[in-house]
Structures are given as C-alpha cells and as structure tokens.
Amino acid sequence: MGNKVINVDRYAKYVDEIRELKSRNTDLEKLNMDLLRRIDELHGEYLELRYAMKGMASQGEVLALRKKILELQNELHLAMLAP
C-alpha cells in the first residue's frame, strides 16, 4: 500500500474557498433574478411609451379590445341562433 498523506490545512482552505464561492454564487443568482425582473419592468414601460408616442393602443388595450370583440361575436352568434 502506498502512503497517502492528506494535508489538512490545504483541505480546510479549499473547503472554505468552496463555501465562499457557493455563497457568492447564491448572491449573484439573487442579483441576476432582481436584474431580470427590473429589465422586464423597464421593457414594459418602454413599450407603453413607444405605443403612446406612436399613438398606438397599448398591449393591454389591444387585449381588452380583442376580448370585447369575442364577446360581441358570441352575442351576435347567439342572436342569429335565436328564433
């Protein structure tokens, strides 16, 4: 059998470094999620501003209009089926 010597100081140092890196990675992941959320919010505000400057309806307004059109189509269809 070969002699295997484990340097405890070196091992402890690496374990500490790994813990620090894991902690830093967790912090960076949280920061990344926060930045992604903020980018999404800014993008939404940018789209609203762009639509307003062009005089276009916002995405919310378009969705509301589509919903109203579908409701009216359903009412018309039901009215045509009624005797």
Image: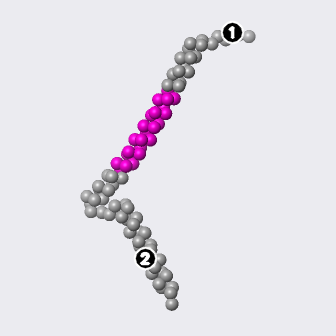
Task: Identify which residue is drawn at 51% across, 90% down.
Answer: 83
Which residue is nearer to you in this view: 30 or 57? 30
How many numbered marks appear? 2
Task: Identify which residue is drawn at 45% across, 34% down.
Answer: 28
Q: Residue furthest bottom?
A: 83
Residue type for callout 2: Leu
Foreground disc of the pair 1, 2: 2
- Residue 65: x percent and y percent? 38, 69
- Residue 43: x percent and y percent? 35, 50
Residue 47: numbered disc: none
Residue type for callout 1: Asn
* Neighbour tally class for label 1: few under 14, some 14-19, many 20 plus, Cα within 10 Å: few
Task: Identify which residue is drawn at 53% across, 24% down.
Answer: 18
Q: Tell me the CA gap for discs 1 and 2.
A: 85 Å
Q: Which residue is mark 2?
A: 72
Q: Residue furthest right?
A: 1
Q: Is residue 13 above or below residue 38?
A: above
Q: Which of the 4 image quadrants contains residue 8? A: top right
Q: Which residue is mark 1?
A: 3
Horizontal side, residue 2 vs residue 19: left or right? right
- Residue 61: x percent and y percent? 36, 64
Q: Is residue 6 above or below residue 16?
A: above
The chief SS type of the magenta part is: helix
Q: Earlier in the sequence, mark 1 or mark 2?
A: 1
Magenta span covers which residues? 21-43
